Amino acid sequence: MTISTAVILAAGRGTRLAGAGLDVPKGLVEIGSETLVGRSVRLLQQRGITDVLLVTGHQASLYEAFAATRQGVRCLYNPNYSAMGSLESLCCALNVAAKPFLLLDSDILYESRGLDALLKESAENAALISSPTGSGDEFYAWADGSQNIHYFSKSIADKLEGPTGEHVGILKLGVPLQGAMLARAHGKLRREPMVPYESLLIELLPEHPMKNAFVYNLLWSEIDNEEMLVTARNVVWPGLLALGDR
């Protein structure tokens, strides 16, 4: 399956980073003289992604300015970003998507071999899963013997067996799964406005299998609070430089 489109969810307010004194959205935080979203766009385009859709909300004008300087990047504004969670932002993209795409969080710094693993995976639906990071805000994934993911959760106690690894925040979504998510999303959002997209994804996994694209010891970090930002700048970024993975 050839993938030429990526969706980056970039609507959130990033309130847990307020203590760091940042005046930009998380995706526009600079590490190594490049923004997180800028680095993702560059890595995606190097791998043949020609259409990058940024779903924006908080400080959307800053992303519009960013997109104006990047060929193949466009923005889609989520007017409900402050009252609804990531599922609502994903729905904005699903309404205009017509082909398989990679789905990325905006606030991650990661080794590019993670993208390679997803793009090489033959299954139409797949999630990038890493070894445990000990970040303190892990989102775990569980896979069966066939390496189909059957559950995501931030609570390791949800299952008796240990998780397969950690959900990095990069997935590949095929068109049938996209359609199923869009068909059920609005009802779920009426009941749970702030629900993350993973909650609906879990419900659909039995009908739409998702492969575990596991990468051992993947170097990455989410940047959800000030401590994670320090880790990204002082641990993950130097590690990426040592690997030649700018």
Image (cartoon, rainbow, N blue to C red):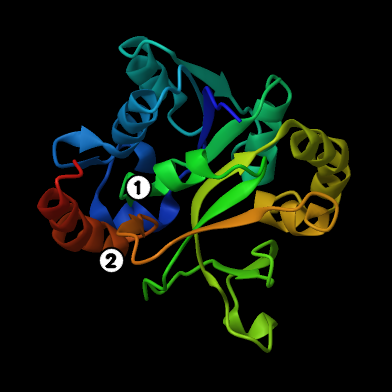
Q: How far apart are marks 2 and 1 (CA)?
A: 25 Å
What residue is rendered at 83% in x and 58% in y? 206
Give residue 151's position: percent from left, percent from top. 69, 67
Quarter placement of the N terminus: top right
Residue, disc 2: 227
Return the mark for residue 113: 1
Q: Which amino acid does label 2 sit on?
A: Glu
Give residue 221's position: percent from left, percent from top. 34, 58
Q: Which amino acid does label 1 sit on?
A: Arg
Task: Describe the element under mark 1 as helix, strand or loop.
Answer: helix
Question: How crowded is the residue under tag 1: few (<14 C-alpha within 10 Å), some, or many (20+)?
Answer: few
Question: How crowded is the residue under tag 2: few (<14 C-alpha within 10 Å), some, or many (20+)?
Answer: some
In the current view of this chain or complex, which residue is farthest to the bottom?
160
Quarter placement of the C terminus: top left
In terms of depth relative to the viewer, which is nearer, 116 or 234?
A: 116
- Image quadrant in which you'd find residue 73: top left
Location of residue 194 with respect to 130 vertically, above or below: above
Q: Which of marks 2 and 1 is nearer the N terminus?
A: 1
Give residue 185's position: percent from left, percent from top. 81, 42
Q: Are marks 2 and 1 in contact (CB under 8 Å)?
A: no
User: Is residue 84 visible from the viewing direction of this image?
Assistant: no
